[in-house]
Each structure stands twice: as structure tokens, then as C-alpha cells.
Image (cartoon, grey):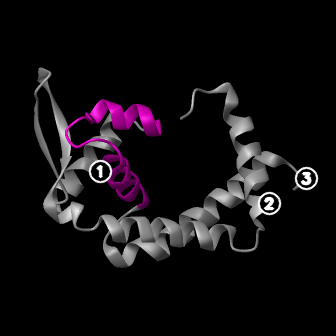
Amino acid sequence: MNQDKVAIWLKFVNLECDKLSFEILEPHGLTLTQYKVLKFLLINPQGTIRQVDIEEHFYISNPTVTRVLQNLEKKGMIERRSNPNDNRSKVICLTEQAKSMADLLYKLGDELEDRITGNLTQKDKQDLLRLLKKILSRKEID
């Protein structure tokens, strides 16, 4: 089997990211998807994010997001509130408990980034980021 294929190496990197994220997040009782959802809620104005926004942003199915939100709700990290702009939907809001973890969540993200890219120079990181964005340029990304 030819191991010099970009798709294979992207998969290897993805697996390594999953492994490292588990090591970093598990002691804090978080999965990678829960972490990403919490960070997404942190960087957006409180009370503006609906479940469908999470599904679309992360390309995750409705049942998966429902489970993630249910688990975060059980942990006391989020709550669902009536959407002031549309009574048919709910917005996802961080609880005070989750807001108090903001610094920790950013620190954990930095730790994951540092462990993944630790052997790269700043130029390497910039080049890699540019190339990854180029690969995804056929899709609409933020």
C-alpha cells in the first residue's frame, strides 16, 4: 500500500489529534465534541446560537448534536432558552459554571495546539494552515 498519499496522512493526523484531545480533555470530563461546542458558544454572543447553528458549523448530524447538548445539560454546562426572535426554537446558553471555565477551555485548546504542532516552526504552522485552508477552499469555511 502506498503510504505517500495526502488523504492517508490527514487521517493519521486526525487520529493523533483525537488521541491527544482525549488525553487533555478526559481529566476534565469532556469529549472533543463537547469541548468544541462549548468553545463555539463562548466565542459567540450569549443567546444567539441554536442547535441547527452547531450542526451546520461543525457538519454534525442532528441526533449527534442532540446527544452532545443533552450531556452538556446534564453536566450543568448549558441550558436551552426560548429564542426571543422565534418562539418555535431554542437558543443554547452557557451556564455560569461553563462561563467560569472559559480560561480553562482556552488553555486546554492552546495545550492541544502546542502538542500537535510542537515540532513545527512558526513558518511551518503558517504554511500548514494555508495548505489545509486551500484543501478546504472548495467548501465554505469560516
As helix, strand or loop, the secondary structure at mark 3 comes to loop
Observer-nearest residue: 92 or 73?
A: 92
Q: Chief secondary structure of the magenta span?
A: helix
Write down the quadrant of residue 50 in the picture. Answer: top left
Left or right of 48? Residue 81 is left
53 within the magenta span = yes
- Crowding at dot 3, Cα within 10 Å, few <14 / some 14-19 / many 20+, comes out as few
Q: Distance between the residues labelled 2 and 1?
A: 34 Å
As helix, strand or loop, the secondary structure at mark 1 comes to helix
User: Residue 101: x, y in percent?
Assistant: 27, 68
Residue at 24 percent across and 48 percent down: it is: 69
**Dot 2 or dot 1, earlier in sequence:** 1
**Dot 3 or dot 2, earlier in sequence:** 3
Asked if the residue under mark 1 is in contact with the one under mark 3, i.e. CB atoms within 8 Å, the reply is no
* Residue annotated with mark 3: 2
* Residue annotated with mark 1: 68
Write down the quadrant of residue 52 in the picture. Answer: top left
* Residue annotated with mark 2: 124
Q: Give the range drawn in magenta.
A: 32-59
Identify which amino acid the numbered label 3 is placed on: Asn
Identify which amino acid the numbered label 1 is placed on: Val
Q: Is residue 30 above or below residue 64?
A: below
108 within the magenta span = no
- Nearest to viewer (mark 3 / mark 2): 2
Observer-nearest residue: 30 or 39?
A: 39
